[in-house]
Image (tube, rainbow, N blue to C red):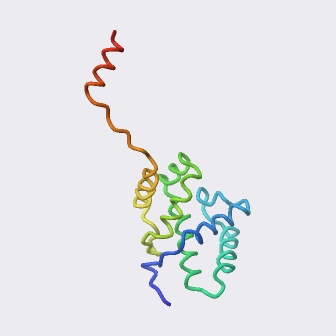
């Protein structure tokens, strides 16, 4: 199987989260804030080789998507969102990175990534219907009295 770097194949979110889990277990979990260094890359590459020993195309797609996930979090808006939401942001970010369209030369589009994260996080919010105008007026009159 061959593929073009302008359209990296999707990977399983579980495989992408396993790479992140490996870095966290090795006390290197802050890669989304500080970027990747050689030790991070070596740990991630070892995990990819362990999981996909006989499947080099899948291993490469997974590794490229992981690197671009870390790279997209270099954007200020994504770093700020991570600071605001914390670890609750990890699962949706990994799911988005695993399945979104990716051009390896350009990386993920930070604006689209932010919008996708907001959409993923807002699905857990229960909408509150506005109160009827009469009830609002009654509440205002009660407060005025």
Instruction: State the image coordinates of residue 84 (x, y, percent, origin top left).
Output: 53, 45
Instruction: State the image coordinates of residue 101 (x, y, percent, origin top left).
Output: 42, 72
Screen quadrant of the C terminus: top left
Please state the total of marks drawn on the protein image.
Answer: 0
Q: Residue furthest right?
A: 26
128 or 7: nearer the viewer: 128
Q: Residue furthest bottom?
A: 1
Instruction: State the image coordinates of residue 133 (x, y, percent, origin top left).
Output: 26, 28
Please say if 3 is above or below 11.
below
For image coordinates 32% across by 18% down, the residue present is: 140
Q: Residue furthest left?
A: 134
For image coordinates 58% across by 49% down, the residue present is: 86
131 or 102: nearer the viewer: 131
Does residue 73 appear to the left or right of 139 in the view shown? right
Q: Quadrant of residue 100?
A: bottom left
Please say if 7 is above or below 93.
below
For image coordinates 51% across by 60% down, the residue present is: 93
Does residue 40 appear to the left or right of 109 in the view shown? right
Q: Quadrant of residue 31?
A: bottom right
Q: Residue furthest top?
A: 145
For image coordinates 56% across by 75% down, the residue present is: 62
Please say if 84 is above or below 70.
above
Q: Quadrant of residue 66?
A: bottom right
């Amino acid at each position: 199987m061959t593929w073009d770097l302008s359209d990296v194949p999707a990977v399983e979110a579980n495989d992408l989260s396993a790479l992140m889990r490996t870095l966290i277990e090795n006390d290197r979990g802050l890669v989304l804030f500080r970027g990747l260094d050689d030790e991070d890359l070596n740990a991630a590459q070892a995990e990819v080789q362990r999981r996909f020993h006989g499947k080099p195309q899948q291993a490469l797609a997974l590794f490229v998507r992981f690197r671009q996930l870390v790279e997209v979090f270099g954007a200020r808006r994504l770093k700020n969102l991570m600071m605001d939401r914390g670890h609750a942001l990890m699962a949706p970010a990994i799911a988005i990175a695993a399945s979104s369209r990716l051009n390896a030369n350009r990386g993920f589009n930070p604006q689209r990534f932010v919008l996708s994260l907001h959409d993923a996080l807002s699905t857990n919010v229960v909408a509150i219907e506005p109160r009827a105008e009469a009830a609002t007026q009654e509440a205002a009159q009660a407060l005025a009295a």
